[in-house]
């Protein structure tokens, strides 16, 4: 069912950049699945204020797609490996909000396949920009060759994170082989792959 004109106007007036806690005071009778879907599509962080009855898997994934930090507001029943795997497909940075006990190699690889670099300026560090990547949220015990391989395949700059001891010719060869297989699978034939994708090992 489509939202009413009043609901649309209220969302326009109260969604980001307005304070999210405005959603504590949604007018009576407006709390519907359609209303909350539109709310999280505009700002995934609003999931914090969605009534538990409306926190379905689909709505939570829609929120995470808009803002990966929404993962911290999912209900207990969705805290499963299957749901977290689905969340990683929306944004690898969502790995930050997965409980350590539920992080597996498969989950970390899924996050790396949808990874990117981001930048943040820490408090009290005037002009100091920190580079962050989903690898920052992988437990040391799970920083395996397979995880690093998935990260580098997604973005060669992730080689910055690969331990020196792992930067072998064999590791680089596996990266190139994986890229060629991906190219062949996509129909491009693989020609030219594996030559300019990553920096030479130093």
Image (cartoon, rainbow, N blue to C red):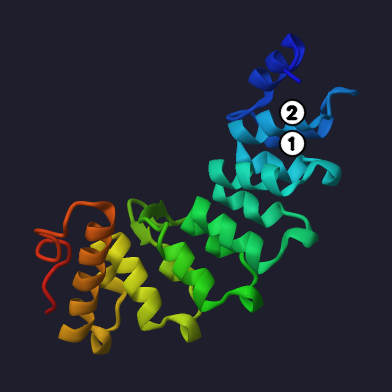
- Let me know if residue 168 appears in the view: no
Residue at horizontal 62 percent and vertical 43 percent from the top? 63
Which quarter of the rendered picture does the C terminus lie within? Answer: bottom left
Pick out the residue farthest to the top.
5
Which residue position is annotated with label 2? Answer: 34
Give neighbour class at mark 1: few <14, some 14-19, many 20+ (Cα, 10 Å): few
Q: Is label 2 in a helix, a strand or a loop?
A: helix
Residue sticking out furthest to the right: 28
Quarter of image, res 163: bottom left
Q: In front: mark 2 or mark 1?
A: 2
Q: Is residue 29 left or right of residue 197?
A: right
Image location of residue 100, percent across then percent down: 62, 75
> Which of the image's four quarters has the N terminus?
top right
Q: Residues within 10 Å of mark 2 (few under 14, many from 20)?
A: some
- Residue at position x 73%, y 33% from top? 36
Q: Nearer the viewer, residue 9 or 56?
A: 56
Residue at the image point whose x is 55% and y is 44% from the top: 65
Distance from disc 2 to disc 1, alpha carbons, whole Å, reads 19 Å
Of the numbered discs in the image, which one, if any, rests on residue 21? 1
Most foreground residue, 141 or 85: 85
- Indicate the position of residue 153 as horizontal and vertical percent values: 29, 65
Secondary element under disc 1, as helix, strand or loop, is helix
Vertical order, 24 against 150 (above or below): above
**Location of residue 23 by image quarter:** top right
Residue 21: image x %, image y %?
Answer: 74, 36
| Up/down of 141 relative to 28, above or below | below
Q: Quadrant of residue 67?
A: top right
Q: Position of residue 129 (x, y in %)?
A: 34, 55
Q: Which mark is residue 97?
A: none
């Amino acid at each position: 069912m489509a939202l009413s004109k009043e609901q649309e106007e209220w969302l326009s007036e109260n969604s980001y950049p307005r304070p999210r806690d405005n959603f504590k005071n949604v007018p009576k009778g407006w709390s519907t699945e359609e209303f909350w879907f539109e709310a999280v599509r505009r700002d995934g962080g609003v999931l914090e204020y969605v009534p538990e009855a409306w926190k379905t898997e689909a709505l939570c994934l829609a929120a995470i797609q808009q803002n990966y930090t929404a993962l911290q507001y999912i209900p207990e029943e969705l805290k499963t490996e299957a749901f977290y795997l689905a969340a990683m497909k929306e944004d690898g940075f969502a790995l930050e909000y997965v409980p350590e006990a539920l992080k597996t190699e498969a989950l970390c690889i899924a996050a790396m396949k949808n990874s990117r670099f981001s930048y943040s300026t820490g408090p009290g560090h005037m002009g100091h920009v920190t580079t962050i990547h989903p690898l920052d949220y992988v437990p040391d015990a799970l920083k395996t060759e397979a995880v690093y391989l998935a990260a580098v395949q997604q973005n060669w700059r992730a080689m910055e994170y690969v331990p020196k001891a792992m930067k072998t010719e064999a590791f680089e060869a596996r990266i190139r082989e994986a890229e060629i297989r991906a190219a062949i699978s996509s129909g491009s034939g693989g020609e030219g792959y594996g030559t300019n994708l990553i920096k030479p090992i130093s």
